[in-house]
Amino acid sequence: MTQTPVRLPKDLLDFSHLSASGLEALLDTSIRMKAEKYRGLELAGQSVALVFEKPSLRTRTTLELAVVQLGGHALYLDQRQTGIGVREPVRDIARNLERWVAGIAARVYKHETVEAFAQHAKVPVINALSDKTHPLQALADLQTMREVFGKTGGLRFAYVGDGNNVLASLLEVAPLAGLEVRVATPKGYEPDAKLLKTAGAKFTYVPAEAVEGAQVVYTDVWTSMGQEEETAKRLCDFKGFEITNDLLDLAAPEAIFLHCLPAHYGEEVAEEVVYGPKSRVFDQAENRLHTAKAVLYHWLS
Ligand code: CP
Ligand code: NVA
């Protein structure tokens, strides 16, 4: 596969070093790979370590398949094997893994852990979700929007729910993708003010105000992995923030609904929305494979 080379930092921890043209090239690669059902040998004879402190269906599966479809071998290491910070420090794990593998994808509780992997490993490190960001998810989200609307520039994008890691990556990438962002969270769950500002996002505490006229309506769980102790409080604090068909009716007629999944029905979203005509969540999940493949192609090959 011949692709325009993209100038990239060693690691993909967030989007701070990505340009609009870099983003476009990544999405172009992913869209081509999807169309061609691409299989390659870019990682032939190489291994990639998938270091996961937290559970995962989509990220683990798609990264593992992406490695295999590029001819490589994926090595899944959960916390029982690595014992990050318990059995040995992250620096030592990084200094071991770099001797054996071509790259490391890490899903971690604390963002500092993935930063430490990047700092101490000579090989590229991909953030497979931290408490702060989830860049791989945002790439699949953008691909899904581009497939439906033919572009991302100028799309009216509404996020309703928790000001969490998934939203942070979407806010980071929004200016590169040209999204017009509106965000609604309950009081106390706002995203980082700087991210809102650089995204040029409009913020409100009223879900209907965010959703009105939007072409993309997005939500994520109210309680992220690692926040389970706060579940009861969050269920109270997020009352009125569920995406229902009534709320979705306020969006533009052509609007689509996205959710990174897993979904908690009757909490952040009604089941009939995820399985309704506006939902594109399973296309979005499929695109996790193609974008993971594009990321590995550009960062590791
Ligand atoms: N959306 C997402 O990252 O899903 P997993 O937690 O299953 O990987
Ligand atoms: N915000 C969620 C995303 C899961 C894909 C979490 O961090 O658990």
Image (cartoon, rainbow, N blue to C red):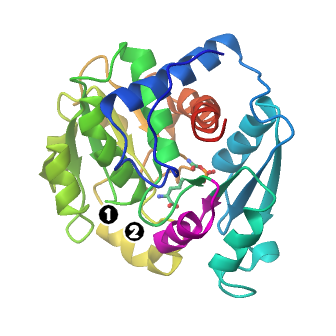
Circle 1 residue: 238
- For the C terminus, the image quarter is top right
**Cβ of disc 1 within 8 Å of ligand 2?**
no
Please say if 113 is above or below 271: below
In the image: residue 292, left or right of residue 111: right
x then y, percent, for residue 173: 33, 41
x then y, percent, for residue 25: 45, 24
The residue nearer to you, when weighing 6 against 226, is 6
Amino acid at the residue labelled 1: Phe
Residue 1 drawn in magenta: no
x then y, percent, for residue 212: 17, 33
Circle 2 residue: 235
x then y, percent, for residue 219: 39, 46
Residue 116 drawn in magenta: yes
Q: Residue furthest bottom?
A: 86
Residue ID at (36%, 34%) = 245
**Cβ of disc 2 within 8 Å of ligand 2?**
no
Residue ID at (47%, 55%) = 13
The residue nearer to you, when weighing 22 against 256, is 22
Label ID, residue 248: none
Measure how far apart labels 1 and 2 are at the Cα level.
6 Å
Q: Helix, strand or loop at disc 2?
A: helix
Image quadrant in which you'd find residue 40:
top right
Residue ID at (63%, 64%) = 121
Amino acid at the residue labelled 2: Leu
Q: Helix, strand or loop at disc 1?
A: loop
The residue nearer to you, when weighing 159 against 264, is 159
The residue nearer to you, when weighing 181 against 122, is 122
In the image: residue 197, left or right of residue 299: left
